[in-house]
Amino acid sequence: MANIKVTIAYDGTNYHGFQEQRGTSFMTIQGVFEESLSRLAKKEIRVVGAGRTDAGVHACGQVVNFESEDLRIPPERLTYALNSVLPADIIALEAAVAPASFHSRFSAAAKTYRYVIYNGKMPSPFLRFYSYHLPCALDLEAMRDGARSLVGKQDFSAFRALGTPVKTTVRSLFGIEVSKEDELVYIEMRADGFLYHMARMITGTLIRVGLGKLNPREVADILANRDSMKGGPAAPARGLFLDRIEYPEDTLDC
């Protein structure tokens, strides 16, 4: 039984998130990927994804894995085979055999999300699905000051959607960077994991800081109060990208 790891990229615009929603008519990344993979294998195959991106969220480096007993396509040819049957907005980038113990989600050591804000005066017809248009001036230094209080191992209850039960709301945010290139503002977050809507709510909070609606010092207060009604609001999904997922070397060596 081979455990296959596949890295994929996708435009999430037309999908109701990554995770399969069985019993519904919603089209998801996982559902379409599994259907294409099953066509190649001539049998039903289910995959496990590293990150459950929301509707409209994109990915540059999502990772999935699946077990297959008799997949006749060698891993080095699997990406080409998949891309011949996948829709144009989902692309297989890399495929390899992983150890039997490898799990795309639970083996991950870090995930990086990147949020894109288009800070031009007028909307861009080319970036409308891949950024949040915000024409107002942003104080990037204030946003960086507010972001510093979020770094570390902390309880991120204030930055998650209500009604999403988890075993723990503690996460380690390894770093958060706010940068700008021309009219594009980037907020990049790297952590050991993210709560539901955590990246978008952190972004929404930092936008409020950048607009002068929130003092940078108040970000620490929001975190300490653990009240999700004071964090955010969540920035629109279309500006968010799952950029990359990192794994320890010993989880990848067969």
Image (cartoon, rainbow, N blue to C red):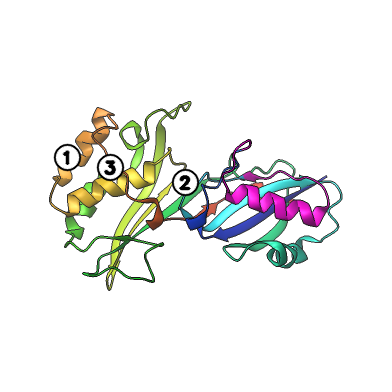
- In the displayed structure, 244 sits above or below 198; it is below
Residue most extreme to the front:
25
Foreground label between 3 and 1: 3
Q: Is residue 201 left or right of residue 71?
A: left
Q: CB atoms at circles 1 and 2 under 8 Å apart?
A: no
Disc 3: which residue: 233
Q: CA distance from mark 3 to mark 2?
A: 15 Å
| Labelled disc at residue 75 | none
Q: Secondary structure at mark 2?
A: loop
Q: CA distance from mark 1 to mark 2?
A: 27 Å
Disc 1: which residue: 218
Tell me the residue at 75%/43% (across/down). 100
| Image quadrant where one finds the N terminus | top right
Residue 4 x/y as whole percent: 73, 51
- Mark 3 surroundings: few (<14), some (14-19) or many (≥20) residues within 10 A: many
Tell me the residue at 39%/47% (across/down). 174
Q: Is residue 188 at least partly visible in the picture?
A: yes
Identified by mark 3, the residue type is Pro
Disc 2: which residue: 54
- Magenta span includes 230: no
Q: Is residue 47 left or right of residue 16?
A: right
Tell me the residue at 82%/60% (across/down). 73
- Mark 2 surroundings: few (<14), some (14-19) or many (≥20) residues within 10 A: some
Identified by mark 1, the residue type is Glu
- 215 or 134: which is nearer to us? 134
Q: CB atoms at circles 3 and 2 under 8 Å apart?
A: no
Identified by mark 2, the residue type is Asp
Residue 118 x/y as whole percent: 30, 65
- Give the mark, 3 or 2, whose residue is nearer the N terminus: 2
- Magenta span includes 34: yes
- Give the mark, 1 or 2, whose residue is nearer the N terminus: 2
